[in-house]
Image (cartoon, rainbow, N blue to C red):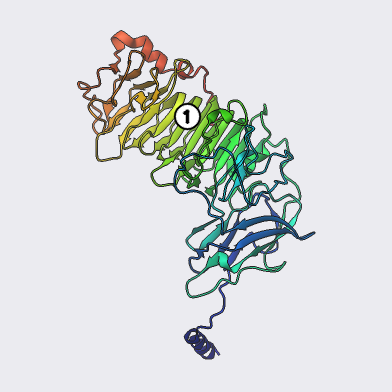
Amino acid sequence: MKKSLSLWLLLALASGVVASAAPAALFPANRSEGVNPDTHLELTFSEAPVLGSSGQIRIYDQSNDRLVDMLDLSIPPGPKEYPASAPGYIQSPYPYVSSSFTNANTRPGTPSGGAAPTPDTYQLTIIGRFTDGFHFFPVIIHGTTATIYPHNNMLEYGKTYYVQIDPQVLTLSGQGFQGISGKSGWVFSTKKLPPSADSDTLVVSADGSGDFNTVQGAMDFIPDYQSRRVTVLVKNGTYEEIVYFRNKTNVTILGEDRDKVIVKYQNQESFNPHPANFSTNELPGTFPSRRAAFTVDHSDGIHLVNLTIMNTTPFAQAEGLLLNGRENIIYNCTVRGSGDALQSNGPAYYEKCLIEGSGDMILGRGPAFFKDCELRSPGPYMWIRNTSANHGNVFLYCRFNTTGNNAADLARSPVNGSRTYPYCEAVLIQCQLEGISPAGWGTIGGDASNVHFWEYNSTNIRDGKPVDVSRRHPASRQLSIKEDSTTIANYSNPAYVLGWTPDLSQIKR
């Protein structure tokens, strides 16, 4: 029997008649129950599939055959080049209304500042209720698994859905993908109810075993401006998603293991450009940038602990983390970006973090206090934009480990084109350096009388000896314990720099 079967397969191959390839596994599995509504969809094959440029993925409500969501692969994910005039308001050619948000303005392209939308021919989804919309990849392939990302907040609790996929969506070498059709090929039911509204802890797990599959799903669930602290416990796994939330307070996002909880996405300024006019924010205090992998916007008391955040775009304006708010703490985290790795706006405290990127690696308006952190960059390490209203970047016991082949500057000039920051501040106290240029700092143009490029007791990483500062830029300053003991003490105190005392008692338990 086995011999006959093998002979039949050989004859079939020779004649070009081969059965269509079917997925080896589906996630959620067919006829699964208790699925989280923020689930992604996975098809795993015996070989690597190739993404097509046409075809649709459709999700239907089984109770009435209503089309709930549709992804059209003929629409490209987003622009590849930075447009001459970045559209401030964008709309999808296939607009949709989110079922999970009662706010009527939950359609991509709903103007956030009163302007009329401009047409957009790219994939769009709403993230964190930011109705200008985000470009995104509807399908991402890694190895033999194709992961499908439905539009956010389209599925509901207590529903049964069936999925249909056109054959053109995926191809495999030597075999055809027959797609998934009908009402029974891929069916799943969501959980009957969400977590309790008064839960102090929410669990995120990529395998569907927690309260949510995605970090964004958990953050969307948490009410705005709440007074009690909620912990989002993120289980080990890779979370390939753009995370964007605003108006959240008192939330701890706690990873199970720093190196095993990875939140990442390939995002950048040319893929998701910010509005040309930053004054057209949806809400006062928000920062309408969509280019980071992980954005905390207009949010206070956010603690990010024990996780890795990565922007996987090759060199571009592409932060791993963009932080905008007050009294935020980043502890024991890795932040990687392309070009810009971190943008920090508003009082923020960083401890035991690795920050890795390229030129202008740290952007921001401050104040930001870094303690016992490692920074890796080919330089310049930062472009500081603080005004006289607050401090800039202060580094205590940090390590600057240059990754390029050339000597690096610690900071970009306060004057950069038409932009000037005459009060910019970067203070290094007892830091270790490697690969820094003899001048230490970039060209300082204009009036430098209020620029604070200061160091105290910088040493070499390789041998622990004092850095040769004899050729430091004349506008910079070396602090001494004899003449500047009060200044050194002040800048070693986070409360002095930030205007508030970070409480790490709960984080370090």
Image quadrant holding the N terminus, namely bottom right
Asked if residue 418 is positioned above or below residue 12 in the image, the reply reads above
Q: Amino acid at mark 1?
A: Ser
Looking at this view, name the residue that lies furthest to the right: 64
Q: Secondary structure at mark 1?
A: strand
Q: Is residue 72 above or below residue 198?
A: below
Q: Could you tell me which quadrant the C terminus lies in?
A: top right
- From the viewer's side, name the closer residue of 426 and 260: 426
Rendered view: 178 above or below 88 = below
Mark 1, other Cα within 10 Å: few <14 / some 14–19 / many ≥20: many
Could you say which is closer to the camera, residue 187 or residue 267?
A: 267
Residue 492 x %, y %: 40, 18
Q: Which quarter of the figure has residue 480?
A: top left
Q: Relative to the observer, which residue lies in front, 153 or 124?
A: 124
Q: Residue at x 32, y 18 (%)?
A: 446
Task: Residue 40 in the image: state x and y as whole percent.
Answer: 61, 54
x then y, percent, for residue 52: 52, 63
- Residue 164 on image: x %, y %: 66, 64
- Asked where in the image residue 400 lies, by quadrant, the reply is top left
Q: Residue at x 46, y 24 (%)?
A: 365
* Residue 262 in view here: no
Left or right of residue 78: residue 416: left
Visible residue check, residue 77: yes
**Count of picture labels:** 1
Q: Residue at x 41, y 24 (%)?
A: 393
Name the residue beneath numbered marker 1. 344
In the image, what residue occupies the spot 29% across and 18% down? 476
